[in-house]
Image (tube, rainbow, N blue to C red):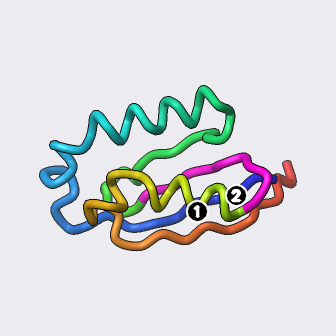
């Protein structure tokens, strides 16, 4: 199944993320290599994050997202994960 992640960044995300960025990117790289992460990144304004995951269930994606250093350190302030049907 595929899942869409939609979330928000804290107001000063570009500054606050700096000490955590390497760990964040390393985790995303592992997820990509394992085939669970399709894509993830910020909107142009860096106010929101968007991602697509492929996993057996939503709980797997929620565990990955909530385990990310950006979530644990408050860089991501809210996240929503929804099952997604790729129609085209």
Q: Which residue is mark 1?
A: 62
Q: Position of residue 32 (x, y in %)?
A: 58, 32
Could you tell which of marks 1 and 2 lies nearer the N-terminus? 2
Q: Which x, y percent locates residue 70?
A: 33, 55
Q: Is residue 19 left or right of residue 80?
A: left
Which residue is labeled 2 in the image? 3
The residue at 35%/41% (across/down) is: 24
Residue drawn where x is 56% and y is 59% of the image = 63
Looking at the image, residue 56 lies above or below residue 8: above
SS for callout 2: strand
Helix, strand or loop at label 1? It is: helix
Camera-side mark, 1 or 2: 1
Report how far apart the C-alphas of labels 1 and 2 lie in the structure.
10 Å
Magenta stretch: dominant SS? strand
What is the span of residues highlighted in magenta in the rendered image? 49-57
| 50 inside magenta stretch | yes
**Residue 60: percent from left, percent from top:** 66, 56
Please give the name of the residue rendered at 33% of the width and 61% of the height, measured from the top-left corner.
72
């Amino acid at each position: 199944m595929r899942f869409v992640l939609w979330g928000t960044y804290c107001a000063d995300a570009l500054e606050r993320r700096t000490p955590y960025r390497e760990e964040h990117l390393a985790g995303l790289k592992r997820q990509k290599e394992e085939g669970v992460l399709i894509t993830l990144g910020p909107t142009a304004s860096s106010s929101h994050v968007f991602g697509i995951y492929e996993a057996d269930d939503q709980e797997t994606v929620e565990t990955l997202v909530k385990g990310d250093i950006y979530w644990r350190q408050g860089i991501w302030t809210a996240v929503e994960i929804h099952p997604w049907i790729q129609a085209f």
